[in-house]
Amino acid sequence: MPGSTIAILAIYLGFALLELWRSNLFAKPEQTRDDGIVEAASIIVLLGFTQPAVLFGAGALAGMVAPEYAGALVNLNLFAAIALFLVFDDLAQYFWHRAAHTFPWLYNLHRPHHNARYMSVRLVYRNNLFYYAMMPGIWLSGVLIYFGLGWVYAGYIVVKLLVITGAHSDVPWDRPLYAIKWLSPVMWLVERTISTPATHHAHHGRHADDPATNYKGNFSNLLFFWDILFGTAKITRTYPESYGVENLPETSLGEQLVWPLVGKVPVEQPAESGIAQTETPASA
């Protein structure tokens, strides 16, 4: 899928250049030295190793279990094929993300994504290095590709990354559209269909009492409809005053990247995480 790879890189670079022009891509508010390292390591490992390894690995496993089904869906109707990816990738990722804000051990893998006190395209792939290796949606996508839907995935993943990258960017493309009154019905539909900066920034809000924050919801990636469907949506058309998670315990570079190999023992998380556990130092 070289065409898809080029398109994804172009999308990411486009938003990065937009941030560089409108704000400052490399010097974000409250940025630390570790932030850039975590983000660089995450994107390099995910795109260079984890994602292709999981996709190929899932296909190999499917071939061992059901060799007779290789390419079985290659002639499937386009809309049906897209629906399969929306369910087995995007919906699966919604529940995976929601679980990451429910179970302490999984939150430790996802916490680096929220450790940043800013929004940026730099956060799109920012997670613990094990987080994506375990993500069900990538494994299931690999199986669908094995079934012959690689041609659909090539376009699907470009659209998904376009939405996700735009939703993380600190350049709010939706804000000027909200200000146009005659577009209000259109934006009403858009913000309930896909993730936008306003709806996803809400998930990254630092303070629970900020009206624009919804840290325990707005989990969707491509389709915001999942949050609407499962009752976790909050739509305000506004943006949090600050980002991160209040009262989040200190962490280390090693813990962000390779917990549980390095780091702390989970005991209790801040209430804003929606988890009943946080962390205390362990002897290492």
Image: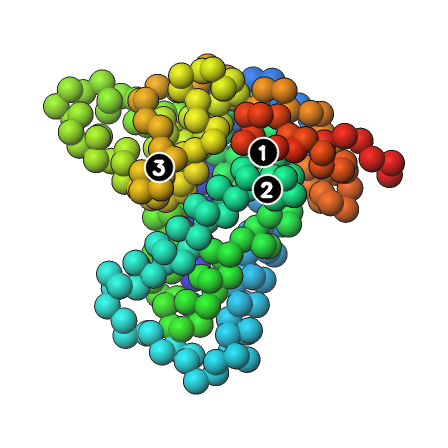
Q: In which quarter of the image is residue 54?
A: bottom right
Q: Position of residue 73 (x, y in %)?
A: 33, 74
The mark total stands at 3
Mark 1 surroundings within 10 Å by alpha-carbon count, few (fewer than 14), some (14 through 19), many (20 or more): some
Which label is found at residue 226? none
Residue in view at x 46 percent, y 62 percent: 140
Circles 1 and 3 in contact, beta carbons < 8 Å: no
Residue in view at x 27 percent, y 36 percent: 192
Tag 3, which secondary structure?
Answer: loop
Q: Which of marks 2 and 3 is nearer the N terminus?
A: 2
Tag 1, which secondary structure?
Answer: loop
Q: Quadrant of residue 40?
A: top right
For the residue pair 16 and 187, the one nearer the viewer reads as 187
- Is residue 224 in sight in this rendering? no
Q: Is residue 252 left or right of residue 237?
A: right
Location of the N terminus by quadrant is bottom left
Residue extending farthest bottom: 68
Residue in view at x 73 percent, y 45 percent: 260
Q: Position of residue 207 (x, y in %)?
A: 51, 18
Mark 2 surroundings within 10 Å by alpha-carbon count, few (fewer than 14), some (14 through 19), many (20 or more): some
Q: Distance between the residues labelled 2 and 3?
A: 19 Å
Residue hosting label 1:
275
- Is residue 32 in sight in this rendering? yes
Q: In this view, does 69 lie to the left or right of 32?
A: left
Q: Distance between the residues labelled 2 and 1?
A: 6 Å
Q: Which of marks 2 and 1 is nearer the N terminus?
A: 2
Residue 65 higher or lower than 263, as above or below: below
Residue hosting label 2:
103
Q: Is residue 257 left or right of residue 200?
A: right
Residue 61 higher or lower than 275, as above or below: below
Q: In which quarter of the image is residue 38?
A: top right
Residue hosting label 3:
231
